[in-house]
Structures are given as structure tokens and as C-alpha cells.
Image (cartoon, rainbow, N blue to C red):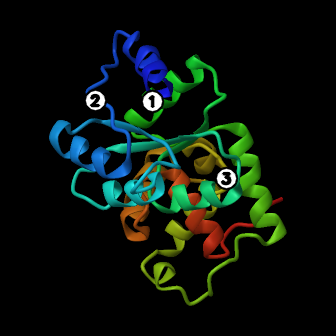
Amino acid sequence: MVRAGLCAIVGSQDDLTVVGEAADGLSALDLVARERPDVVLMDVRMPGMDGLTATARLTAGEQPPRVIVLTTFHQDAYVFQALRAGASGFLLKDADPASLVAAIRTVAAGEAMLSPSVTRRLIDAFATGAVTAARDDDPRLAGLTPRERDVLTQIATGRSNAEIGEVLGITAGTVKAHVNALLPKLGARDRVQATIVAYDLGLARPR
């Protein structure tokens, strides 16, 4: 019933097409391999292979789809595991249809999307120490230039490229170039993933 409802919502949009649905993680992997969708809506708890494992498998492949984890569960652990597995968005199932459709379009365009409540929980977890920072000698830092570190720190504050440029005294285009350079160095697919890395590395702290 849940899948039918999601299909109805997505399928009602002129610019979106549902190419298939799966009842478990393993079936989802097979379906994605056949259909090559742009975006996957992934549940967390499913029989057999769970959604977090399936997300990690999907995002580790070549030309992976963007994954939005959609669940009824509010536990912080699911949020952190989903984002670390490579998800580009995390929405609760009580989100309204417009928010769901907007999330799909957002991640399809190459951006990342988190519901406001999820973002607050993520930052709160770092603030309370539920997510610990990595050591200063983390090898991921060694590959970044000083300016890329500056940009990464600003990304973690949620600032746009233009806003980062104003803070650092460089153009938005230069910021974009730094972002494009640092993401693959960190193994991050988007700004949300980069933000998690920034907190992990101790480059950012909750205010």
C-alpha cells in the first residue's frame, strides 16, 4: 500500500516517471541494474537486505543513482548510517506529497536534501557528542589544499557558494571550482556528505 501511494504521487508529475518498485533491498539492486533510474526512494526496514545496506551497495557502483531514504523511523542512527552509506536525502514518511516530489527533483538535479527535523537532529548529535570527530591526522585532510579546507568549513555552515565567496573574499565561480575539487578527494557525492566529513574531521562545530 505504501509503494502504491508513492507510485501514485510520483507518477502524477509530468516530469517524473516511475520505472519500477521492489519489496526488498536485493530486488531493488536487481531493478536498478536493469532500469538505471536517476533517483531511488529507499525504505530502511525491509525483509532480507535492509535499505541501508542496499543504499551502500547502490552508491558504491559506477554511475550510481541518487538515493532518498524514506522511513517512518526517527532514530538518529538511521540518519547517520543512511548519509554515510551515500544517501543524498532523508525524508520521513509523514512528509507531504509536495515535499516528496521536491526532494526527488532536488537530488535529481545533483543537490542533497534533508528534512528540517533531520538536519536539526544531525547537528544536535554532533553538539552532544553522539557523533565523534576523527583524528586531526585523518588522511582525508592531507589531500586538501588550505583553501579547500576553508571552503569545506564554510560548506558545513550551510552557506551557498555566493555566501562562501563573500566570507573568503573570492568569487562564487572560484568557490564552485573548489567544491568540485574537494568532493572527490573526500569521497563525498554532494554537500551533505561533505558536511558530515567536515564534522568528522573537526573542521566544523555546532554553534
* Mark 3–mark 1 distance (CA, rounded to whole Å): 31 Å
Report the side of 205 relative to 113 (left or right): right
The quadrant of the picture occupied by the C terminus is: bottom right
Viewer-nearest of discs 3 and 2: 2
How many numbered marks does the figure carry? 3
Residue 75 locus on image (x, y percent): 70, 54
Q: Are marks 3 and 1 in contact (CB under 8 Å)?
A: no
Provide the residue designation for mark 2.
20
The mark that comes first in sequence, 3 or 2, is 2
Query: Which residue type carries mark 2?
Result: Gly
Query: Which residue type carries mark 3?
Result: Val
Residue 195 locus on image (x, y percent): 59, 59
Circle 1 packing at 10 Å, graded few (<14), some (14-19), many (20+), is many
Report the side of 79 relative to 75 (left or right): left
* Mark 1–mark 2 distance (CA, rounded to whole Å): 15 Å
Provide the residue designation for mark 1.
104
Give the quarter of the image for residue 10: top left
Q: Is the residue 149 above or below the residue 64 in the image? A: below
Circle 2 packing at 10 Å, graded few (<14), some (14-19), many (20+), is few
Give the quarter of the image for residue 95: top right
Q: Are marks 1 and 2 in contact (CB under 8 Å)?
A: no
Residue 35 locus on image (x, y percent): 19, 36
Q: Residue furthest left?
A: 34
Label 1: state its secondary structure: helix
Label 2: state its secondary structure: loop
Provide the residue designation for mark 3.
167
* Mark 3–mark 2 distance (CA, rounded to whole Å): 45 Å
- Give whichever of 155, 17 is nearer the camera: 17
Q: Which residue is painted at 65% across and 48% down in the image?
A: 158
Query: Which residue type carries mark 1?
Result: Ile
